[in-house]
Amino acid sequence: PRSIWLSRHGESEFNLDGRIGGDALLSERGELYARKLPELVASSVKDGQKLTIWTSTLKRTIATARFLAASSKGYDKLEWKALDELDSGVCDGLTYQEIADQYPEDFKARDDDKYNYRYRGGESYRDVVIRLEPIIMELERSENIIIVTHQAVLRCIYAYYMNVPQEQSPWMEVPLHTLIKLTPRAYGTEEQRFKANI
Ligand code: G3H
């Protein structure tokens, strides 16, 4: 059977400061993860299996996948705008503390209904689920794919394959520096997690 591998980008400079959104590059630790990704993937791919790499259009996912793309395996690579991180609109680049200070009502509204809350000038998780529909359709008719993208986006894709109601996607656990392998089977999706330990 075919599998789908999911990975967040390596830790970014914004992750270090607790800032959301943006288009930052990787931190030193994030770089280490990018360098380790080819062997992490290799340990969970069967010999000779072909793999296609999908990233978002943001620097941190492209940087994370670059060693994997350059590996001797000759993997194809595609960048999708639809895989970009949930757009946090006017809150882009802020920390959660800054959001709470500058937009207290929004901060509370999001806490009350994280799935439906739409950032001013940005998106909600519900919006992300809708924009991911073409991605899911393409995934359903594809062979082995590794998706290197962002936390909110991965939570939605993960919930879809694990048969969790989409409303629960904002709470799915998709940690940094962990490769998730999903293998859809007749009775449900089989999951394996591989930690990079860096
Ligand atoms: O802004 C996107 C973050 O990756 C998701 O974090 O939805 O838990 O705030 P959050």
Image (cartoon, helix red, strand yellow):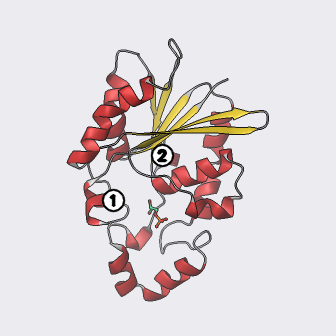
- Above or below: residue 54 compared with residue 116: above
Residue 169 picture location, percent across and down: 61, 59
Instruction: Judge from the rendering whether residue 98 lies leftward or rightward of residue 78; answer left or right.
Output: left
Residue type at tag 2: Lys
- Residue situated in front as seen by the camera: 20 or 197: 197
Q: CA distance from mark 1 to mark 2?
A: 14 Å
Q: Quadrant of residue 103?
A: bottom left
Residue drawn at point x = 26 percent, y = 39 percent: 32
Crowd tier of the residue under label 2, counting other residues whose Cα lies within 10 Å: few below 14, some 14–19, many 20 or above: few
Residue found 60% across the figure and 39% down from its top: 191
Q: Are marks 1 and 2 in contact (CB under 8 Å)?
A: no
Residue at the spot x=59%, y=53% of the render? 156
Residue that lies at the very extreme toward the top in this rendered image: 48
Q: Nearer the viewer, mark 1 or mark 2?
A: 1
Query: What is the secondary structure assignment of the residue under circle 2?
Result: helix
Query: Which amino acid lies under the numbered mark 1 shown in the image of this protein?
Result: Gly
Q: Quadrant of residue 64?
A: top left
Q: Please tell me how crowded label 1 is: few (under 14), some (14-19), or many (20+) other residues with Cα within 10 Å.
A: some
Residue 31 is labelled as: none
Residue on which the image places disc 1: 22
* Residue found at the very far left of the displayed protein: 28
Q: Quadrant of the N terminus?
A: top right
Residue 119 percent location from the top left of the image: 49, 72
Please indicate whether residue 108 sits to the left or right of residue 2 in the image.
left
Name the quadrant of the C terminus.
top left
Decide if ligand 1 comes within 8 Å of the CB at mark 1.
Answer: no
Q: Which residue is mark 2?
A: 81
Q: Is 158 drawn above or below residue 3 in the view shown?
A: below
Left or right placement of residue 85 versus residue 95 in this view? right
Q: Position of residue 165 (x, y in %)?
A: 71, 58
Query: Counting residues from the N terminus, which is met first, the one under dot 1 or under dot 2?
Result: 1
x, y (%) of residue 98?
A: 32, 79
